[in-house]
Amino acid sequence: MATILRNTPEGIGRAAVELRNGAVVAVPTETVYGLAGHALNEKACRFIFEIKGRPLIDPLIVHIAEYAQLHELAEVPEDILPMLKNLWPGALTVVLPKKACVPGIVTAGLKTVAIRMPKHPVMRALLQEIRLPLAAPSANPFGYISPTCAEHVQKHLGEKLGFILDGGACEIGLESTIVNLSNPEEWQILRHGPVSSEVIAPCLPERKMLSPKESVISPSENSGQIAPGLLDRHYSPKTPMFLFSGFPADTVRAFSRAAVVFLKRSNQSGLEHAEVFWFSEDGSMESIAHNLFSLLRKLDEGGYDALFVEVPDGFGIGLAINDRLRRAAAKR
Ligand code: TXA
Ligand code: MG
């Protein structure tokens, strides 16, 4: 099992020492937990892929604390700086042309690099102490539900890790929005997330908005390359999962032990073999996002024959929730 490092100067200091020495450490962010390594150390980044079981064709996000690091890692167009000043630190990842110092393993050979300045105070303290950029994918085995607390990481990757830095439950609970800004004339959402296109669009008045990528993408310079955050099946429980809007009574009855998950508190009854849950008391998209992955994980361990999950309308962060649920329920 991994040693859990507490949110103290000593815990953060130990994580920094391990990372500087090339180890992989699980770290908290406001979106989901990450599996971090020194981004400019090729060997450390290779460990990340090995521990996660992630194919080398799937590039990593690089996390920074200072704007100087952004300019060291990427070519930064002037027109995006006001947007970054507005939305960073936060749940927005930008894809920009990379500089030579970024190892090819981080970007899966692409000429672009994905960068984010996270907001979580523990992650910020760590980044400020270590003064290095940290590459980090979500700290889940490849394809499984993302982790939103230290226990989730311990459960699935604890055997493969030395240390997990515990920053409590992730406030947002959904991965960052990824936006491609590598073409100076355009912008495009590559992955829906907490920062919606309605927030981004007014920040980039000179650029043309391309419609969001909705399925497997092929970055133009690498034919056949895919961005696995956009794989049709991802974030998936092992238990068969079905989506509904409205109430799926007849289908639920076909299973001897099903879990039915509503978006908000429900008094639905009349299903003998089903247990009823909800993501949120009040149905706010923020609270649904916050509980989404942790409830799916809990139900996946509950011994059910099937999970029936209500999907929200796709607007704002609801679009990101909708996207994650559709991929989680997608067939292999
Ligand atoms: O909130 C988050 O973004 C979390 C926390 C830990 O920061 N990280 C995260 O990383 O979700 P990951 O590896 O699970 O998802 C990163 C996605 C991948 O699907 C990858 O394809 C895409 O970012 N990506 C990375 N670099 C890219 C690039 N140069 N071009 C296009 N997509 C890229
Ligand atoms: Mg992920």
Image (spheres, rainbow, N blue to C red):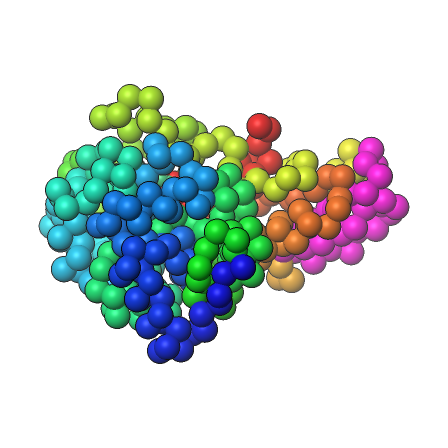
Task: In the rendered view, tell whether residue 258 sits above or below residue 134.
Answer: above
Q: Which range is magenta?
A: 253-279
Q: Nearer the viewer, residue 189 or 49?
A: 49
**Is residue 256 inside the magenta stretch?**
yes
Q: Nearer the viewer, residue 102 or 265?
A: 102
**Image check: 193 left or right of 105?**
right
**Is residue 13 inside the magenta stretch?**
no
Identify the residue at image location x=35%, y=70%.
Answer: 14
* Residue 59: percent from left, percent from top: 32, 39
Where's the C terminus, which quadrant?
Answer: top right
Q: In the image as oriented, which residue stretches furthest toward the top?
A: 223
**Image check: 318 left or right of 105?**
right
Where's the N terminus, which quadrant?
Answer: bottom right
* Residue 172: percent from left, percent from top: 46, 59
Q: Quadrant of ligand 1?
A: top left
Q: Is residue 57 visible?
A: yes
Task: In the rendered view, tell whether residue 45 sits above or below residue 67.
Answer: above
Q: Nearer the viewer, residue 302 or 204?
A: 302
Q: Is residue 206 visible?
A: no
* Residue 234: percent from left, percent from top: 51, 37
Identify the residue at image location x=48%, y=65%.
Answer: 3
Task: In the rendered view, tell whether residue 294 sits above or below residue 10.
Answer: above
Q: How many marks?
A: 0
Identify the residue at image location x=43%, y=29%.
Answer: 215
